[in-house]
Amino acid sequence: MADRYVPHTFSDIDAHPDPARLVGVLHRLRAEPFFTSYKQRVLDLLRAGPGRRFLDVGAGTGDAARRLAAATGAEVTACDLSAVMCREMRGQGLRRVVVADARHLPFRNGTFDGVFADRVLQHTEDPEGVLAGMLRVVRPGGRIVVCDPDTGTQALAIDDHELAARVLALRGRAGFRHGTFARRVPGLLAGHGLEEIRVEARTLLVRDRTTADAMTGVRDWAGAFADRGQLRREEARRFDALVDAALREDRFLYAVTYFLTSATLPALNGAAGP
């Protein structure tokens, strides 16, 4: 059975009754082809190289930071608000790990050649403030890459379309503080004067039971909302039965689109970027 869906799960890791389970979720996701592919693209967009310095904001288990350092020879610092995640990163061999609030990064202006955040801004209380803080610590000519899913793009195919829409709406509101922030990032970066703004869309498409359980926990959504009084218990049972039927009969479909946004800070005096 998939882990029980918990609102704001990755916003309050240290307060979770079983934070080790959340660490396990992230470790399992890193093996899924969809995540492996788009996460590699995030790293490619940083244009990293030997001797350059990069910051992973909301680094989680630190997989991306380790991969970037190993593949490019860059110096990578990982920061996360969660002490649990920072302990996990250190245990996995990362040396440059900092417990930090992304709104108040403890680094001087222009410290890094690039900064990135993967599935982080959607969970923060102040995503615009976090984005501004990320830009502050990047040097002129440096790179920023941000990736988040947009919950407004969710699609779910079961026989009761109205119930599916209600559950998706609840998930978008309860599971993410800013589930549609990803669509705003390009405009905000343009407002900050960034250049080379590029947006790429990657759609997660799930149709089989194994992937549905491992990557979405869809069969726990309705029950969690019933526990919180947001859905009647009989509606939750009906939702679960419809999901099971759709999976069994090869009619199930869940999809959500991720937006990868990359950009370059303006260089000073014509200096070259990374």
Image (spheres, rainbow, N blue to C red):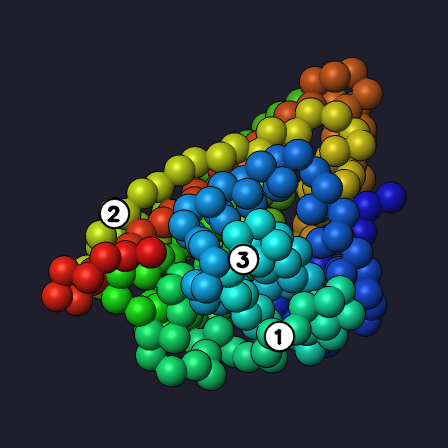
Disc 3 element: loop
Q: Which kind of residue does numbered mark 1 sit on?
A: Val
Please state which of residues 142 and 170 is positioned toward the viewer in this rendering: 142
Residue beneath the point at 63% across and 40% down: 36
Disc 2 element: strand
Residue beneath the point at 12% across and 66% down: 269
Q: Which residue is mark 2?
A: 196
Q: Which kind of residue does numbered mark 3 sit on?
A: Gly
Q: Which mark is residue 107?
A: none
Q: Which residue is mark 3?
A: 73
Q: Are marks 3 and 2 in contact (CB under 8 Å)?
A: no
**Crowding at mark 1 (Cα within 10 Å: few <14, some 14-19, many 20+):** many
In the displayed structure, does residue 215 sit left or right of residue 200? right
Residue 138 in the image, given as x and y percentages of width and height? 35, 68
**Between tags 3 and 1, which lies in front?**
3
Q: Which mark is residue 97?
A: 1
Residue beneath the point at 19% across and 61% down: 271
Residue 159 in the image, given as x and y percentages of width and height? 67, 23
In this rendering, the count of numbered labels is 3
**Residue occupying the far left of the picture:** 269
In the displayed structure, does residue 40 sit left or right of residue 213? left
* Disc 3 from disc 1: Cα separation: 17 Å
Instruction: Give the mark, 3 or 2, whose residue is nearer the N terminus.
Output: 3
Residue 107 in the image, given as x and y percentages of width and height? 43, 81
Instruction: Give the mark, 3 or 1, whose residue is nearer the N terminus.
Output: 3
* Disc 2 from disc 1: Cα separation: 30 Å
Q: Is residue 216 above or below residue 157?
A: below
Instruction: Give the mark, 2 or 1, whose residue is nearer the N terminus.
Output: 1
